[in-house]
């Protein structure tokens, strides 16, 4: 399968199974659920749109990566941007919409006669996400350097007259 | 093996580790919370021996761990006056191995004068905190329930 076909299929997969359901989810969820969740301090609508937007941007970047040569700086930039989007996705997901919380989420709900406060500590997974994305950046740069070397080698071989 | 391949393997390991760790820790924490709430006896009881005398409040729980990871659970009960100052507090920490269950009994002693203030209408409250840590204490959840004493008695 060519890189272009693979990129188009990957984008279709992301849009149909990930972005489209997320963009239609708010209209399917009853209003009282939104109100109930917003009382806990979580903006569900903003959370859903953030995740869908990340999916859209990631799709565009995947298309760009599929249609430009692996040796171009546009490919490197698109790959590094994809890595950044992956980190942002992890931050938003583990912080339930507010990436600045860095994996520490507080949910407060009113219960009969009192208040229930829940604090989730998921900072470990944010740290692991940083580690994974850091490694992905190294991988992207190494892959880019290798592709440039291969291209230079192929260029030298093509320009050398046969003996 | 090329450097790029080594980095690729490391990325896979970190990502797999994250997914497995997340799944296992979430399963353990949800299991302990559900096991504490639904499993066995659980109740807050307030006793006043004689009119005008001191009182006590007891919280009995039977937390269980149906998960795959060890969990450290801290249970705390506190009675607060109308200004939020603690009148008394008690806590207990238990280490729950997978499949393990341990009884937790917490007791608050309330002085006669504080009982009198509550009876006279002081807006006292009871705070119950369940704090769970798992995956070598790296992941956790803390749940605090604050109830007005009038609702508790």
Image (spheres, coloured by chain):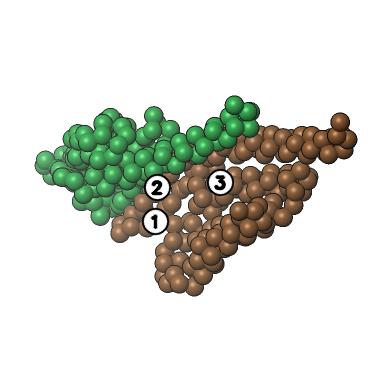
Chain colours: A brown, B green
- Foreground tag (3 vs 2): 3
Rounded to the nearest whole Å, what is the CA distance between mark 2 and mark 1? 9 Å
Query: Which of these two is toward me, B97 or B109?
Result: B97
Q: Tell which subunit mark 3 falls on.
A: A
Crowd tier of the residue under label 3, counting other residues whose Cα lies within 10 Å: few below 14, some 14–19, many 20 or above? many
Label located before the other in sequence (3 or 1): 3
Q: Earlier in the sequence, mark 3 or mark 2?
A: 3
Residue A113 in which image quadrant? bottom left
State the residue position of label 3: A91
Query: In the rendered structure, the residue with mark 1 lies on which chain?
Result: A
Count of numbered marks = 3
Judge left or right: residue A111 versus residue A16: left
Measured in 3D between alpha carbons, the distance from the residue under mark 3 to the one under mark 2, in whole angstroms, is 19 Å
Q: Is residue B81 visible?
A: no
SS at badge 1: strand
Local secondary structure at mark 2? strand
Outermost residue to the front: A163
Residue A154 found in image quarter: top right
Pointer 2 with pointer 1, Cβ within 8 A: yes
Q: Report whether A120 appears left or right of B4.
A: left
Vertical side of A9 occupied by B67: above or below: above
The reply to the same-chain question for discs 3 and 1 is yes
Find residue B101 and report its horizontal and vertical position in percent: 20, 35
Of residue A88 and residue B153, the one placed in the foreground of this image is A88
Give percent across and percent down for residue A6: 61, 55
Disc 1 marks which residue?
A: A109
Residue B34: where, in percent of width, then height?
Answer: 26, 47
Query: What residue is disc 2 on?
Result: A118
Location of the N terminus of chain B by quadrant is: top right
Name above or below for residue B100 compared with residue B146.
Answer: above
Depth check, front residue: A99 or B13: B13
Q: Residue at x 73, y 45 (%)?
A: A70
């Amino acid at each position: 399968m060519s890189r272009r076909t693979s990129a188009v299929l990957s984008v279709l997969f992301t849009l149909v199974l990930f972005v489209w359901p997320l963009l239609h989810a708010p209209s399917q969820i009853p209003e009282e659920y939104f109100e109930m969740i917003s009382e806990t301090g979580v903006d569900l609508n903003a959370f859903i749109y953030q995740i869908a937007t990340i999916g859209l941007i990631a799709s565009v970047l995947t298309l760009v990566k599929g249609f430009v040569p692996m040796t171009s700086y546009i490919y490197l930039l698109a790959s590094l941007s994809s890595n950044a989007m992956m980190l942002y996705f992890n931050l938003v997901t583990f912080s339930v919409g507010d990436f600045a919380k860095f994996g520490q989420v507080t949910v407060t709900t009113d219960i009969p006669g009192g208040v229930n406060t829940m604090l989730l500590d998921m900072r470990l997974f944010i740290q692991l996400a940083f580690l994974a994305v850091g490694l992905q950046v190294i991988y992207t740069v190494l892959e880019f350097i290798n592709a440039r070397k291969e291209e230079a080698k192929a260029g030298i071989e093509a320009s050398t007259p046969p003996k | 093996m090329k450097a790029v391949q080594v980095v690729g393997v490391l990325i896979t390991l970190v990502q797999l580790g994250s997914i497995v760790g997340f799944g296992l820790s979430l399963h353990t924490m949800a299991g302990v919370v559900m096991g504490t709430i639904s499993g066995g006896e659980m109740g807050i009881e307030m006793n006043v021996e004689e009119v005008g005398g001191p009182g006590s409040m007891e919280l009995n729980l039977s937390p269980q761990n149906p998960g795959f990871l060890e969990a450290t659970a801290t249970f705390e009960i506190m009675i607060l006056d109308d200004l939020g100052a603690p009148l008394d507090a008690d806590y207990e920490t238990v280490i729950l191995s997978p499949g393990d269950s341990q009884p937790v009994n917490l007791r608050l002693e309330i002085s006669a004068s504080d009982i009198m203030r509550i009876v006279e209408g002081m807006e006292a409250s009871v705070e119950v905190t369940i704090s769970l840590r798992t995956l070598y204490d790296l992941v956790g959840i803390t749940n605090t329930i604050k109830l007005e004493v009038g609702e508790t008695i």
